[in-house]
Image (tube, helix red, strand yellow):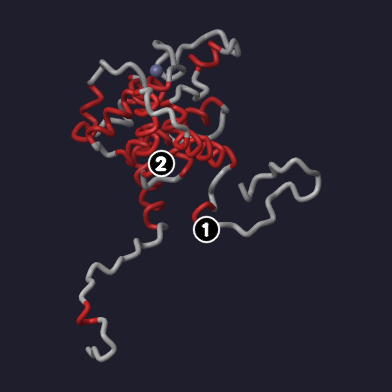
Amino acid sequence: MWQQSWLPRQQNPHPLSLVIESLADARVEILIDGYRFLKSEMEPDGIDENVEQDKALWRTVWSLQIPNKMKILMRRACRNSLPTKEILVRRTIIDNPICDRCKVEPETALHALWSCSELDVVWEDASTWSCRGNTSLMDFKELMSWLIKQNHHLELFSAIAWSIWSHRNRVRMLQPSCNPNQLATLAKELLSKFMAAQPPPRIQPTSTCTRCQGPGFRV
Ligand SMILES: [Zn+2]
């Protein structure tokens, strides 16, 4: 958001405050989404099981060690708010919902990021993604909930899904893009770079031994 000129004024449309290191790559929509989530957390609804499940799901997604842009993609795919062709047809923006990759099925979020047959080359690591044969999933949220329940490579899954969506958009915008069979490798590299850039976790003192804390203690 420090890079974006989003403030409604002609001079200094960028925030002037110092960049907060942990939010350096944050975008305005991420903060809005995060704010909405925190607000919903404080609302005393608690009786709607679906709402509670959604909150638990988003809490898990938000806690993943992945860049914020990936968290937002997961969130939008779960809420069915990604501009897939199926959604664009519903909004009467385009007429044809058929996936550009396989040219067979409607492009939903689940199809675009996971089940399209043209993505076999991306999810081909059968030892990790054999669950892809599970065709009973209704939508992306169901898939994400299932993966969370299994604690199944959530960070890697999110990174690959983000790479697929990013690649899909580049192709649609006629921008240079890599071969789809490179996407899984690129996602792993992206994740490794992100993890390497994270500050080391703070080590909390676990011992409360009072003998070591007295003024006369010497090593
Ligand atoms: Zn397809």
Q: For this view, does 164 lie left or right of residue 120? A: right
Residue sitting at 36 percent across and 22 percent down?
118
Tell me which image quadrant ligand 1 sits in. top left
Residue drawn 74% across the image and 46% down it? 13
**Residue 115 drawn at (x, y percent):** 33, 21
Tell me if label 2 and label 1 are in contact, CB under 8 Å. no
Q: Residues within 10 Å of mark 2 (few under 14, many from 20)?
A: some
Q: Position of residue 75 (x, y in %)?
A: 44, 32
Q: Residues within 10 Å of mark 1 (few under 14, many from 20)?
A: few
Residue under numbered circle 2: 62
Q: Which of disc 1 and disc 2 is earlier in sequence?
A: 1
User: Which x, y percent locates residue 93?
Assistant: 60, 13
- Report the disc number at residue 21: 1
Q: Quadrant of the C terminus?
A: bottom left
Tell me which amino acid carries mark 2.
Trp
Position above or below: 13 against 85: below
- Kindly state the secondary structure of the residue where label 1 is placed: helix
